[in-house]
Every structure is written in C-alpha cells, then in structure tokens.
Amino acid sequence: MMVDRSRSLFLKKKGFLFEPFRFPEQSIPLSNTRLRPDMELIAFERGGMHRAFLAREMAYHHVAQGELAGEPYLVSF
C-alpha cells in the first residue's frame, strides 16, 4: 500500500519528518512468531481484525499507516 502523504501531519518540506513504517501486505499471526515475553506491542482492532506493531520499531518510525478492515489507519508513537 502506498503512503498517502496528504493525510500525514508529519511532513517536512521535502518529504516525511519521520519515515512511516510500511506494514507488509501479508501479516503473520502472533502464534507463528518468536516474540519474547518481554517484547512490547502496540495493538489495535477494527471490524474484528487486529494489527500489532513492535514498540521498538514504532519508537524509530513514529508513524504507521495502512488499511485494516477496508478502512485507512494512522498510528503514531
């Protein structure tokens, strides 16, 4: 999914102030990951669908933008 720059508040004159986290089209169920118990997640739900990001990745990118349950989202951290 392309990032819609017109919807972001985190722009500077020649691009993004923070490079948005680009979520892969194919998501991985948490049960299939090797997450350690001490890893923090930022999770949200829309229309019965769930999405989660590692807090350490969001601390770097600050912004994640995508689509979930047919609706756009923008998460900032």
Image: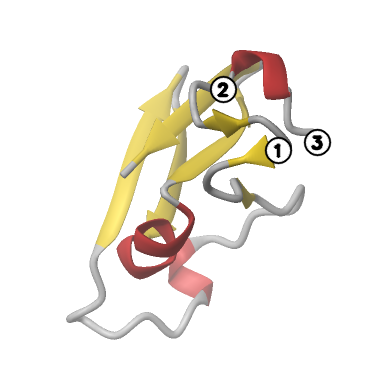
Mark 3 residue element: loop
- Disc on res. 1: 3
- Mark closer to the chain start, 3 or 2: 3
Residue position for label 1: 15
Tag 3: amino acid: Met
Image position, residue 3 (x, y; %):
73, 32
Q: Name the side, left or right, on which 77 lies relative to 9.
A: left
Where residue 2 sits: x, y (%)? 81, 34
Mark 3 Cα shell of 10 Å, populated few (<14), some (14-19), many (≥20): few
Between the C-alphas of marks 1 and 2, the distance is 11 Å
* Sequence-wise first label, 1 or 3: 3
Q: Which mark is residue 56?
A: none
Q: In the rendering, at what x and y percent does residue 5 appear?
A: 70, 24
Tell me if residue 30 comes above or below residue 9 in the rendering: below
- The residue that appears at 33% across and 45% down in the rendered structure is 43
What is the spatial separation of the Cα atoms under label 1 and label 3, in whole angstroms? 17 Å
Q: In the depicted view, which residue is nearer to us: 29 or 57?
A: 57
For the residue marked with disc 2, what is the amino acid? Ser
Asked whether the beta carbons under mark 1 and mark 2 sit within 8 Å of each other, the answer is no
Q: Quadrant of the C terminus?
A: top left
